[in-house]
Image (tube, helix red, strand yellow):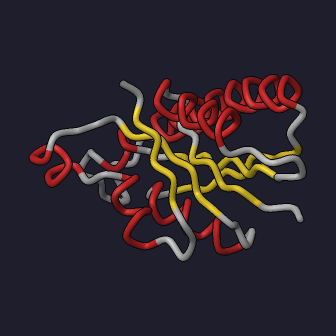
Amino acid sequence: MSRTIVIAMDGSQHAEFAFQWYVQKCYREGDKVVIVYCAEYNELSSKPLTLMSVDKSLITNLIEGEETKVKKLAAKFEDLVKKYKIEGKIVRVNGEPGHGIIKVAEDEKAAMIVTGTRGMGTIRRKLLGSVSEYVIHHSPVPVLVCRQE
């Protein structure tokens, strides 16, 4: 019986470690992997904006930067799935990563979500928020959080 596994991917070493850990420890023949990449436009959202102050070049540069990240991620993912002979696809969502990961898991009827963690301390996690913590508390399916030492 095949399972759909959602893997959160931001291109970081932590996310790649989570993917590798899943493949080595949890993968079952027939699993389908859905890589979720959440585009965040932090530079844009961190600036005070009005409709009159939006710099079109800033928006264009942000979008082009995200497109470049997605292409690099897609190439890396394609290499990994070929290497391990895993069926999979990439789903890109815009906005908050936690919300996006949960939405894709629901839409894809995932059996499990796999994510990495940066190992932030308690204070940083409370101030900045933690994607893995959000996913754990809002996921309709089991969540595997992989922490690289």
Return the x and y of residue 50 as percentages of the image width and height: 30, 58
- As displayed, is residue 46 above or below residue 148? below
| Position of 85 relative to 125 (above/below) | above
Q: Position of residue 116 (x, y in %)?
A: 46, 40
* Residue 73 percent location from the top left of the image: 68, 30
Q: Is residue 48 above or below residue 64?
A: below
Q: How many badges with numbers are in the image? A: 0
In the displayed structure image, the side of residue 134 where residue 27 appears, left or right: right
Which residue occupies 64% across, 66% down?
A: 105
Q: Tell me what residue is drawn at x 26 percent, y 45 percent.
A: 47
Q: Residue at x 66, y 55 (%)?
A: 6
Q: Nearer the viewer, residue 120 or 96?
A: 120
Q: Residue furthest left?
A: 123
Pinpoint residue 99: horizontal percent, then vertical percent. Answer: 48, 66
Q: Nearer the viewer, residue 145 or 10?
A: 145
Q: Could you tell me which quadrant the N terminus lies in?
A: bottom right
81 horizontally vs 40: left or right: right
Quadrant holding the C terminus: top left
Image quadrant where residue 83 sits: top right
Task: Give whichever of 143, 41 is nearer the camera.
Answer: 143
Q: Residue at x 62, y 61 (%)?
A: 112
